[in-house]
Amino acid sequence: MSIAGALTSPVTGPISRLARQTVRTSWVAYLGAFVALASGVVLIATTVNLIGSVDATLAHLGPAATQDQREQLDGLTSMFGIMSGVSMFMALFVVGSTFGFVIATRRRELGLLRLVGATGRQVRRLVLGESLAVSLAASVAGCLVATPLVPPILALVRHVGVTDQHLIAASPSLAWAIAAPTGLVVALLGAWRSSRRAAKVSPSAALREASIERGRPSLPQWIVGTICLAGVVAAAVLAQHSDPLFMLVASILLPEVVVIGIMCFGSLLIPGLAALLGRPFVDRDVAARIARDELRAAVRTTTSVAAPVLAISAIAGSMILSLSFTADWTSAQDRARLDAPLVVQTDPAHAQEAVTTIAADPDVRLADPRHTAIVALADGEEEVDAVDVATATVARGLEAVDGSLDDLHGTAVAVSETWVSDSGKDLGDHLSARIDGQPVDLRIVAVVHDAPDLYGELLVPVDLVAGQLTGTAPSELFVVLEPGVDPVAVRAALAERLAGSQVRTADEWIDAVTAETRRANNLGLTILLGPAGFYAAIAVVNATLIGATQRRRQHRTLALLGATGDQLRRTAIWQAVLITGAGLALGGLTTILLGILTRRAIVADLAGTGVDPAMTVPWLPLAAIGVTCAVLALAAALAGARPARSSGRG
């Protein structure tokens, strides 16, 4: 039977056997795709297992779960949910692009098949068969690796201080049911897109010694890229009129949109940017010139290798910068609202003594205690602030932007601006609640400024929850002094007399709260970005090695033309530097853009308060992203250049 005849058989026939044979004989080409998909399945399965562990733990606790335990588990659900979104995007993005990249690099081999009589449809079926074989093996391997990782990961989550709950591992069946099919489908979608291009490979491609890949985006890429970038432009226009918390959410979602948009035009942007970065060096080092020319000619390889660098630098950088700016925003809110010059933090054992001592001090005008209580609403239990409007207005700058705080008595509630935007309720609406076991109809009588460190999103009169507050200690006492009294002297006197209490000036207290917020943010970022960052590291090394493997033939040709091993090694280094630099540059621009949008929303929100928010740029973690990507890419490039050096010496 002829080759053409064999290829016309059904998928279950000779073409399926041929696909398995080509995978076995061309395993090096598919090794990178296998690693990318298996690691991606591990990542997806791990995030699903973490979310499942929260449900399993809550089910194990049952009705005996305390309010604190439920709040911790709810927080973990939200955190793991965001982590799973970021991780899944990284996995799907890298897997899809890697499979398409690997298939695109087999242009010469597919041209040989066309030369011996295979039709475009047969080539396409062959490519999909190869991808299916690799995807099945990688999906099973990823699930097998992910399952035993669950207990140590749950222990690590508790060890780093995210929770003090002993999380119970859920059944791995759900993770398998989600991770394996998801990875399989995405890999085949990436292969399907490349198989369409593979079907159009001409037989003459087998005879070409060199080829320049097309750098024009396809029509679907133009459409998707334009929609993504148009969405970013719309967000930029709306940023000045948006709530900073909205921009914080946008800083989690928009980077993915930007990355997709950039990658749609990646064949135009990334090789050109890499060549631009190399321009100052091409006249000084022939290796830099060779590297630049190769990157411009192999646009698909260049774009695919830069993809994981672009994705992790854009996503991680945007989240790190936006969270830092959000901490600056809450700090500025505190400074704008807090009028009390001193803040006393007590422990329960000495709380009553502190209240009595402060009230008896002749230099103290008033002390506003912060009390919280739990109220059962229709959609679950909520923590509310019990406030004395008279003292909170003076000490904490409590002020209504809509309605009147004079009406905050009886069965009334005041809410923050953020709560209004999140809940959809507004002034005059009612909330069904249960307080001390009794049903209560709460009417919203005022909307107040946001100041989460000074008071929460829901505020009720003290007398409404007096039963819960009996015997409880305030978390803070906001102390207002008589006119003309020196706060430093009063602070020193109170610190000496109040055992077990911390007495701080307003600025010191705000600085301490902000520092604690940043520590919590850093811990949250570790959980949110840790798995995705680890996967990105694997993807950067994997993509760089795949790219180096595909360029070995060109480097052997250069060695025959007289290039030395050192020149080939420097060429590999320059390629890694330029590709990584291009990815980091685009990721950095994305980070800067979203940072500017978040900053604009913060400045607009604080307009009229007289407080200029600080702008804290976390240079160290941002620089760490770039350095880590560069080191990994260089190490992989040097490892991939070893055969080229051997060829050069030969």
Image (spheres, rainbow, N blue to C red):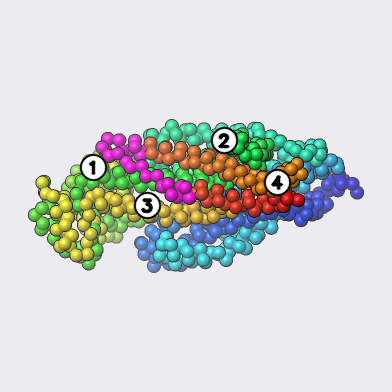
Q: Please tell me how crowded label 2 is: few (under 14), some (14-19), or many (20+) other residues with Cα within 10 Å.
A: few
For marks 1 and 3, give the CA distance: 27 Å
Q: Nearer the viewer, residue 297 or 317?
A: 297
Disc 1 or 2, which lies upstream in sequence? 2
Question: Between tags 2 and 3, which lies in front?
Answer: 2
Q: Amino acid at mark 4?
A: Thr
Residue 17 counted in the magenta span? no
For marks 1 and 4, give the CA distance: 74 Å
Taking the spot 70% from the left edge, 36% from the top edge, the residue there is 213
For marks 2 and 3, give the CA distance: 40 Å
Q: Please tell me how crowded label 3 is: few (under 14), some (14-19), or many (20+) other residues with Cα within 10 Å.
A: some
Taking the spot 71% from the left edge, 43% from the top edge, the residue there is 563
Residue linked to disc 3: 518
Question: Between tags 4 and 2, which lies in front?
Answer: 4
Residue 623 counted in the magenta span? yes
Q: Position of residue 281 (x, y in %)?
A: 59, 37
Q: Position of residue 649 (x, y in %)?
A: 73, 50
Disc 1 or 3, which lies upstream in sequence? 1
Q: Nearer the viewer, residue 304 or 51?
A: 304
Whether residue 416 appears in this view of the structure is no
Q: Which residues are magenta?
A: 601-624
Residue linked to disc 2: 280
Question: Between tags 1 and 3, which lies in front?
Answer: 3
Residue linked to disc 4: 564
Whether residue 251 appears in this view of the structure is yes
SS class of the residue under badge 3? helix
